[in-house]
Each structure stands twice: as structure tokens, then as C-alpha cells.
Image: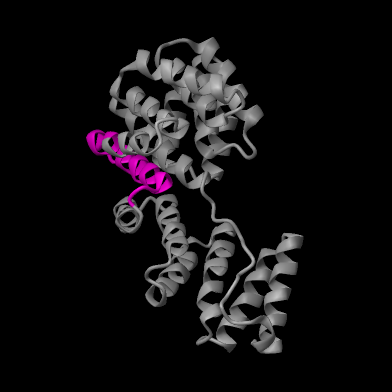
Amino acid sequence: MTDLFLRRLRSALLLLLSAAALPALHAQSTTTPTDSLPADYTRLIDNSFDALGRGDFPTAESALRQAIKAYPDLPSSYALMNNLGAIQQRQGKLEEALLTYSAALQKLPQDKLLRTNRAMLLTEMGRTDEALFDYNELILAEPTNEVYHYGRAMLYLAKGLYGDAELDLEEILRINDSSLKARLGIALLSTMRGDYDKAERLYNYVIDKLPKNADAYEGRARLFLRKGMKGYALRDINKAFEYATSPAASAYALRGEINAAIGDKKAAAEDYSAAESRGFNKTSIEQLRAALRK
């Protein structure tokens, strides 16, 4: 197994983790009765959610900013900062979103939703050590949370810390021995270690249980490509695109590699461009393009 393959796979891991975990936007509940909140404050919040309903993120962001700025000391304003960060993140304003989450966490350091969202954002930004800090804090607060262990395991894989990743994935199975997510993680770990037979067995098991799981098909496609089974790889990546709500950058990069392997350089180049536009590691993309020109 080449170092280049591992670097590409680690780039894909970070994108898979972050793309699967874009923060949800929620109506904020507070301990303060709605009728006791200032009328202009509630109006701005309503305006923000109306804008979200239209998909108008800039207007939604502006309304929340005004509400928080006008009443910064209201407990609900700190809660609203979670939504503000999520809106900024969805617009690609990653540094602004990080500042928002961090400011809110200074006031609400025990808020697990805020810390989870910051961990996912840091993952998206490639700041793995900082993301690991947040996942460590989350696991200290809730040791049996499978999502936290899986998030940390994927970060360990991205850093090449296979033993640490394995411990987290095994802990998930100890908590929930039927976890398919943990089996997907172990399949990915096995692929990175070169244990292709074990990886294939696990991917087959997950696909048998969840026949429309895009992540499982993408993972198995990557495995088949490494084994030189190009036709099977193409079949699986097409299934991944069929079942994915919104294919991740990693899926485009992988499909590009498969298209390159079967000789369709035009399709491969288009996929690499799509992967880059969705945030795939630029160095990895340039290496793939260079290989395509040979």
C-alpha cells in the first residue's frame, strides 16, 4: 500500500466525517417564557427562521446577529449562537463559525451540542488536534456516546493512529454490539492496514443489513479499487452516488480515480474538479491530476 493512497484516504476521512455531520438548524428552546422576551427580539428570531425556510442564509444570519447584539445577556442569546454558527458554516464562513461556537462555549462550556458542532467544524477545517480536544471533552462528559467515539476514531485514522482508532471502534461495539457504524469504521481501518479480506467481509455485512447505505458502497468501492477490481469498484461507486443525498467530495475524488483506472480521463478530470470545489485536499487533487497527465 502506497503512502500516496494513505494520504488521499486520510483526506477523504476528514471530509466524510464533516460532510456527514453538518450541524442541524433547530428552533431554539429556552427556559425563558416566550411572552417574557422582548418583542423585537422574538421578531428577529422569527425573521431568521422564516429566512431559513426560504433558504436565504444571509438574511437568516443577519437577523440572528441583530437579536444577539441587541440582547447579549439573555441566556437564549447564547443558545442562538449555535444556530448562527451553523448558518455561517453552511455558507462556507468557517472562520466566522469557529469564532461563534467558541464565544458561545466560553459562556456555556458544558453545552454538548455546541462542542459537538465545533468539533465537526474543526474536522472540516483540517484542524484535527483541536477537534480531538473537543471529542476528548465530550467523551469525558458522556463516555458511552457512540457518536463521540466514532468521531474521534475517524480523526485518529486520519492521523494514522490506527491503534487508538481501533480502541474507540471496539468501545462502540462494547456499548452496542450491533453497531453497523462501528463495523464500517473497522472496515475502513482494515482497508488502511491492508487487511482487504476482513474489510470486504465487513462491508458485505453492512450492505446486507443496509442495502442503500452510500458510505458502505463508497468504502467497498475504494477497497475494490485497491484490489484492482475496477469493474466492481465502478459498480459500487455508482451505487454510492445513487443512494447519497448529497455526495461528498471524497466520493467524487474516488470516482475520478476509478474513471482514471478504466481509462476515462475526461470523466476523471470532471470528478476531480467537482471534488476540489467541494473542499477536497488541493494537494491530493493535484497529485491525482498529475497522474492523469502521464
Residue 276 visible from this viewpoint:
yes
Span highlighted in magenta in the image: 143-166
Residue 60 lies in the magenta stretch: no
Q: Position of residue 105 (x, y in %)?
A: 40, 71
In the displayed structure, would residue 6 be above or below residue 159?
Answer: above
Q: Using the image as rendered, state which of residue 34 and residue 246 is in the foreground.
A: 34
Give the residue displayed 71% in from the left and 88% down from the top. 39
User: 99 left or right of 65?
Assistant: left
Q: Position of residue 136 (x, y in %)?
A: 30, 54
Q: Quadrant of residue 270?
A: top right
Q: Using the image as rendered, state which of residue 139 and residue 11 is in the foreground.
A: 139
Give the residue displayed 57% in from the left and 26% down from the top. 210
Q: Position of residue 17 (x, y in %)?
A: 45, 43
In the displayed structure, would residue 85 be above or below residue 226?
Answer: below
Q: Quadrant of the N terminus?
A: top left
Give the residue displayed 40% in from the left and 56% down from the top. 119
Colour scheme of the picture:
one colour
Residue 266 visible from this viewpoint:
no
Count numbered badges in the picture: 0
User: 174 left or right of 206?
Assistant: left
User: 242 left or right of 234?
Assistant: right
Q: Quadrant of the C terminus?
A: top left
Q: Using the image as rendered, state which of residue 259 and residue 13 is in the foreground.
A: 13
Give the residue displayed 41% in from the left and 62% down from the top. 115
Residue 156 lies in the magenta stretch: yes
> Magenta stretch: dominant SS?
helix
Q: Quadrant of residue 52?
A: bottom right
